[in-house]
Structures are given as C-alpha cells and as structure tokens.
Image (spheres, helix red, strand yellow):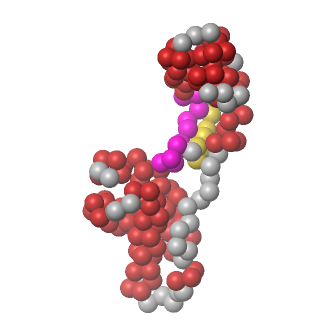
Amino acid sequence: MKKEELIPVWQELNEQLYRFVDSKIKDKELSKDIIQDVFVKVFSNIGNLKNQDKLISWIYQITRNEIVTYFRKNKIQFSKDEIPEHQPEDKNLTSEFSICIEPMIDLLPEKYKEALLLSEIKNISQKELAEQLGISYSAAKSRVQRGRVMLKDLLMQCCEISTDPYGNITDYDLLVNKPRKC
C-alpha cells in the first residue's frame, strides 16, 4: 500500500481510534498525542505490512502497543487483557441508510429509476435487466452506472456520508444548509 492510499483510511479510522485510546487512557489531550504517535508509526511502517487485508487490525495493534507503552513508561498497573486485540466499532449503518435510497431513486428520470430498482433493489443481474428492458447488455450496464451516479449526486445534495475503507456507511448527517431532496 502506498502512503497516499493510507490517508483516506486514516481519516476514516481517526475518530474511532481516538475513542478507543481515550477509553483506556481517560485523558483527552494525552489520547490525541498517542493517536499522533500511532499515525507516525503507521505512516512510517506501511511498507512493512505484508497483507493489506489486515490493515485495520495492524493499525489497532500499533495503537494497542502505544497504549501499553504509555502504561509502562508511567508505571501504571494494567493487564493486557484490558486492552482488546482489535476493537473497531461495528458501526455499519448501510442497512439503516438504505431506507432513504428508494425514495431518492424515485426522483431519477424514469429509465434510470427503472434500471436501479430492478438491478439494485430487486437484485436482478444486468444481463437479465437488458433482456427485460429489451436493450443491449452494454446499454443496461451504462444505464445502471449513470443511474448510480445520478443517485449519488442526489444523496450528496442532502446528506454528508462517511464510509469505512470497505465502502460501508459509518455515519451520515442531513445537511441543513442544502436544499433537502430526501
């Protein structure tokens, strides 16, 4: 993984890591300092990570090690069992947010609305979509893709959406300063 690719992942994990550290350290400023140290170590050693699928676990292990180092330096009694191996929050709001999607799809032009409802909501393949609509497979793929882009644009007009490195929605807020379409 390149260092440039690490920045968005770090931005997604930063608040979660801070809460994890602060739950153990109980000092907001010190927790921020530890997170800063973790960032430096992660950024400096990203080239040593062999399996990119374990990136988040690896970052948590570095974070855990920094907490242990803090306790040892300050001669604070602790048990390693008190600091779990890996504790990312299971904060996947994708299914919760999905109830907002269908009304937004209804706002799309008819041909894109139909393509997304069939492919994304009814879960039919794009090949079946092409047959059902009487269009080429290439046209069906294009229609679904364009519909997704239009849907994303609509969602970005009404909501601020945060995702984890895997694309799962971790947070969303309605934007009060923008006109609401949802």
Q: Position of residue 59 (x, y in %)?
A: 42, 64
Residue 116 visible, this orientation: no
Q: Position of residue 38 (x, y in %)?
A: 38, 66
Q: Does 174 appear above or below 179? A: below
Q: Residue at x 53, y 17 (%)?
A: 137
Q: Position of residue 11 (x, y in %)?
A: 43, 50
Q: Does 88 appear above or below 160? A: below
Q: Say whether residue 170 is magenta.
A: no
Image quadrant of residue 93? top right
Q: Nearer the viewer, residue 12 or 31?
A: 12
Question: Would residue 135 be found to the left or right of residue 72 on screen?
Answer: right
Image quadrant of residue 181? top right
Question: Would residue 103 be found to the left or right of residue 10 on screen?
Answer: right
Q: Which residues are magenta?
A: 155-167
Q: Say whether residue 161 is magenta.
A: yes
Q: Residue at x 66, y 27 (%)?
A: 124
Question: Would residue 7 be found to the left or right of residue 181 on screen?
Answer: left
Q: Position of residue 91 (x, y in %)?
A: 62, 53
Q: Nearer the viewer, residue 134 or 84?
A: 134
Q: How many marks?
A: 0
Residue 76 visible, this orientation: yes
Image quadrant of residue 46? bottom left
Q: Nearer the viewer, residue 61 or 38?
A: 61
Quadrant for the C terminus, please. top right
